[in-house]
């Protein structure tokens, strides 16, 4: 995406678009007033037969006829903008959320949205020529709002969108910069990649996830050290018991089970005690996102299983060492 494209005149936009599309490393070129992740304009309009109080707020994006194809948006009804139709400068393409807000579920194409006309104290009818599948143009924390696309050459176009071949990105950037410098007479060439720019909306969540992951690893490490200390203490307290059991015929495996059983029971109790708080915290965090997964119940038994396995791995070596010790030495222990 190249910023400051509004410095180009209409003829220059057409010219640079044609020249860039001749280059094999560039798939498509488009101009728009906004791009996903960088805000939109808003219009308040009416559906058919609405009262003055029944106004609907829409997001609005000024685009050209290439915008839908370049971003890979899906037309589910009607058609795209056609630069050869002069009337397409005053029509809309609506997203599914807009159609739902209007209540135009049946045959929306060809129906009108009414824009307030304050000069004539009335309303101006604007036709819907197509419907696109909902797409995210803001953070995924937010619900997809009613969106209208309009393709009027006179409207402000801040960005030049260039779709590059994935295997030839930097050569494509150099080509865009070359033609940009020629046509803008030294206007700064400021560009960004849409995927990286849009991903910045989720940097906060990524930081939180990284912090939580680090603290989780640290908590596991501290818990394992605590387990080792607890095991060592318990072994010292049960040295004579272990010696007596071994003299009476207990196997090494049986002794390991006895030594590990109480610790595993404590781990089970600790997990069950933590489940309600964990569920509450996760549900609260996920509620910040309109589009989210449900917290799966099977994460809890999986976490319990992993905790028991880590406990057994941690204590098994020490337990095996004690279980193999000479029972005579154990019985002499004071």
Image: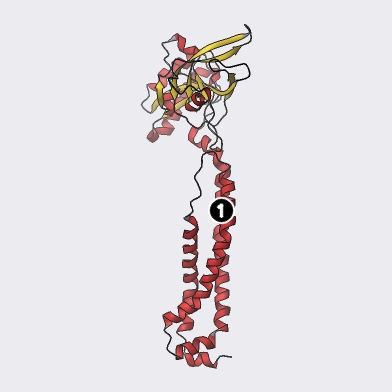
Q: Secondary structure at mark 1?
A: helix
Between residues 140 and 294, which one lies in front from this camera angle? 294
- Residue at 45% x, 88% y: name it: 246
Residue 37 is situated, as x and y percent measured from the top left of the image, at: 54, 32
Q: How many marks?
A: 1
Q: Residue furthest top?
A: 120
Residue 138 visible from this viewpoint: yes
User: Is 86 situated above or below 222?
Assistant: above
Residue 105 is left or right of residue 57, and the answer is: left
Residue 100 is situated, as x and y percent measured from the top left of the image, at: 50, 26
Q: Residue 71 falls in which quadrant of the image?
A: top left
Between residues 161 and 181, which one lies in front from this camera angle? 161
Q: Residue 166 falls in which quadrant of the image?
A: top left
Determine which residue is flagged by label 1. Answer: 279
- Residue at 50% x, 69% y: name it: 311
Residue 262 is situated, as x and y percent measured from the top left of the image, at: 53, 75
Between residues 83 and 101, which one lies in front from this camera angle? 101
Residue 11 is situated, as x and y percent measured from the top left of the image, at: 48, 12
Quadrant of the image for the C terminus? bottom right
- Residue at 46% x, 67% y: name it: 309
> Which color mode does the image show?
secondary structure
Residue 193 visible from this viewpoint: no
Give the class, few, some or many, for how many residues have Cα within 10 Å of label 1's Cα (few <14, many ≥20).
some
């Amino acid at each position: 995406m190249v910023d400051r494209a509004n410095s180009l005149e209409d003829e220059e936009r057409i010219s640079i678009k044609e020249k860039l599309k001749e280059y094999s490393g560039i798939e498509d070129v488009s101009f728009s007033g906004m791009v996903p992740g960088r805000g939109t304009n808003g219009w308040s309009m009416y559906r058919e037969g609405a009262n003055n109080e029944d106004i609907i707020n829409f997001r609005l994006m000024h685009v050209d006829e290439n915008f839908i194809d370049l971003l890979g948006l899906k037309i589910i009804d009607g058609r795209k903008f056609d630069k050869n139709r002069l009337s397409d400068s005053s029509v809309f393409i609506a997203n599914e959320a807009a159609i739902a807000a209007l209540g135009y579920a049946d045959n929306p194409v060809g129906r009108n949205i009414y824009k307030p006309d304050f000069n004539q104290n009335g309303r101006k009818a604007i036709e819907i020529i197509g419907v696109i599948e909902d797409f995210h143009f803001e953070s995924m924390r937010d619900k997809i709002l009613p969106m209208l696309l309009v393709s009027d050459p006179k409207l402000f176009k801040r960005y030049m969108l260039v779709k590059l071949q994935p295997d030839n990105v930097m050569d494509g950037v150099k080509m865009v910069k070359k033609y940009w410098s020629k046509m803008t007479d030294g206007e700064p060439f400021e560009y960004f990649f849409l995927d990286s720019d849009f991903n910045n909306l989720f940097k906060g969540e990524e930081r939180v996830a990284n912090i939580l992951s680090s603290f989780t690893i640290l908590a596991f490490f501290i818990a394992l050290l605590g387990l080792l200390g607890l095991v060592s203490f318990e072994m010292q307290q049960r040295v004579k018991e272990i010696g007596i059991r071994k003299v009476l015929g207990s196997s090494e495996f049986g002794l390991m089970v006895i030594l590990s059983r109480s610790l595993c029971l404590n781990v089970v109790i600790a997990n069950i005690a933590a489940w309600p708080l964990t569920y509450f915290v996760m549900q609260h965090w996920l509620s910040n996102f309109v589009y989210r997964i449900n917290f799966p119940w099977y994460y809890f038994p999986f976490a319990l299983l992993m905790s028991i396995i880590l406990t057994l791995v941690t204590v098994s070596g020490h337990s095996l060492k004690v279980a193999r010790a000479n029972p005579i030495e154990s019985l002499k222990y004071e």
